[in-house]
Amino acid sequence: MNQGKFVFSQVMDFIPRYQFDKIVKRYKGDWHTKNLNSYNHLLHLLFGQLTGCDSLRDICLCLEAHSRMLYHLGFRKSVSHTSLSRANENRDYRIFEGLGCLLMEQVRTLYSNTKLSDITMDNVIYALDSTTISTSIKLAAWALGKYGKGAIKMHTLLDLR
């Protein structure tokens, strides 16, 4: 039985809520929203990322399976995959980009006085992200992926200097 906070809620404590709300207000992220505000949207996406969910439907099914723990994880309520899909389409990406830049700036200031010469060459730190984007094999016959499905592999490398 759980004796303290869940790991997911402990990870979410590192996100500066006040600054995130300022970014949401700047880009009007919660304008005309009914069920899914920007912070709850962020929680859904981070939960899917941390648990290794493959799709929006997978995120929603996993959260429904843990419906008794939603409050303790930090969710107000779970939403359907269509609401999550609409939020992904309509919400401004600059909200999440701003949060990412804010978190990278916090990490940069935390470790600005630390010498990294023993760890990396030339004291350069990179953040690497890799994802696979599924495509239709009929529309992109050149993008042959696993199991006869179409896919494009995308890599992103950020210099954190």
Image (cartoon, rainbow, N blue to C red):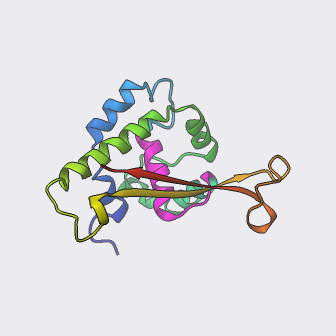
Q: Position of residue 38 (x, y in %)?
A: 44, 37
Q: Position of residue 120 (x, y in %)?
A: 30, 66
Residue 34 within the segment the image draws in magenta: no
Q: Position of residue 18 (x, y in %)?
A: 26, 37
As drawn, 121 above or below 101? below
In the current view of this chain or complex, which residue is farthest to the left?
A: 113
In the current view of this chain or complex, which residue is farthest to the bottom?
A: 1
Tell me: 5 left or right of 90: left
Tell me: 21 left or right of 112: right
Q: Which image quarter: residue 4?
A: bottom left
As drawn, 131 above or below 119? above
Comparing 108 with 26, the one in front is 108
- Residue at 81% across / 64% down in the picture? 148
- Residue at 55% across / 45% down in the picture? 79
Q: Which residues are magenta?
A: 39-56
* Quadrant of the rendering where the N terminus is positioned: bottom left
| Overall secondary structure of the magenta section | helix
